[in-house]
């Protein structure tokens, strides 16, 4: 918290300091747009340190409640089926398909000096993202995010810290998703015509 000192006078007319604690302000101003391409409709995609590795293409999605790990990250971290715990509740993919997860795994995410364990649900479906961090992560971090400003802000050691998104990476992910969908539709069309 920020500490403000106010001077008050006592009966001896000597100044006395009173401490007033004000909560940290977790918000955004026009200065937070500096370095972003405006206007835009980009998702908030960032690099996070997961399991000791800098992982690019992490979708920061405050609307979701499920933290997801996709096959590319699963393979990159050399995880094995025995590393997973059971998770048998189906989830719905971006394409609206029901997906049965491979399992769940708890991994540390480090942000600055703060480390927090996150339980990822591992799915075996295509995604241009490596992972998704979701609302429970925000709540645990006491964070706020903005896709407009391309930032996540959170309190840490009486300061406001931030994670900055990467618009170029977000746009690459969209292009990859569109190309994947076109290739999938083209393959399905070719198979129907055979």
Image (cartoon, rainbow, N blue to C red):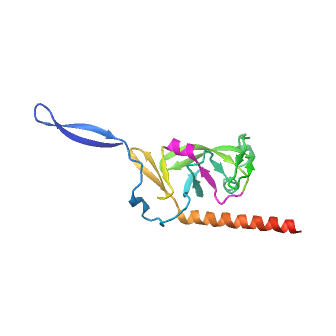
Q: Is residue 42 visible?
A: yes
In the image, taking residue 28 as reference, residue 139 lies left or right, namely right
- Name the outermost residue toward the left: 12
Q: Residue 192 location in percent, x, y?
A: 86, 65
Quarter placement of the N terminus: top left
In the image, taking residue 155 as reference, residue 165 lies left or right, namely right
Q: Is residue 114 magenta?
A: no
Quarter placement of the C terminus: bottom right
Q: Residue 113 location in percent, x, y?
A: 47, 48
In this picture, is 78 found above or below 84?
below
In this picture, is 66 found above or below 47?
above
Q: Which residue is drawn at 56% across and 59% down?
A: 43
- Residue 19: quadrant of the picture: top left
Q: Which residue is drawn at 53% across and 62% down?
A: 166
In this picture, is 125 found above or below 5?
below
- Name the outermost residue toward the top: 11
Q: Of residues 38 and 162, which is closer to you in this image?
A: 38
- Name the outermost residue toward the right: 194
Q: Can residue 54 be seen in this view?
A: no
Q: Residue 75 location in percent, x, y?
A: 70, 55
In the image, taking residue 124 as reference, residue 141 lies left or right, namely left
Q: Is residue 129 magenta?
A: yes
Q: Residue 105 location in percent, x, y?
A: 66, 44
Q: Residue at x 43, y 45 (%)?
A: 156
Q: How many labels does the image show?
A: 0
In the image, taking residue 9 as reference, residue 29 lies left or right, namely right
Q: Of residues 24 and 51, which is closer to you in this image?
A: 24
Q: Residue at x 14, y 32 (%)?
A: 10
In this picture, is 33 found above or below 156?
below
Tell me which segment is drawn in magenta. 126-141
């Amino acid at each position: 918290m920020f500490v403000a000192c106010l001077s008050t006078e006592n009966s001896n007319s000597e100044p006395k300091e009173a401490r007033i604690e004000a909560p940290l302000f977790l918000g955004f101003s026009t200065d937070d747009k500096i370095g972003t391409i405006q206007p835009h409709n980009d998702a908030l995609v960032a690099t996070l340190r997961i399991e000791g590795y800098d992982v690019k293409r992490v979708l920061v999605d405050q609307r979701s409640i499920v933290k997801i790990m996709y096959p590319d990250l699963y393979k990159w971290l050399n995880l094995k089926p025995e590393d997973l715990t059971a998770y048998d509740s189906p989830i719905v993919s971006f394409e609206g398909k029901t997906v049965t997860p491979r399992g769940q795994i708890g991994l540390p995410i480090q942000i600055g000096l703060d480390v927090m364990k996150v339980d990822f649900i591992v799915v075996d479906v295509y995604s241009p993202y490596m992972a998704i961090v979701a609302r429970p992560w925000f709540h645990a971090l006491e964070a706020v995010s903005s896709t407009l400003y391309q930032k996540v802000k959170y309190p840490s050691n009486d300061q406001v810290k931030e994670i900055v998104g990467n618009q170029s990476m977000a746009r690459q992910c969209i292009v990859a998703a569109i190309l994947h969908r076109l290739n999938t539709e083209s393959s399905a069309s070719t198979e129907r015509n055979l």
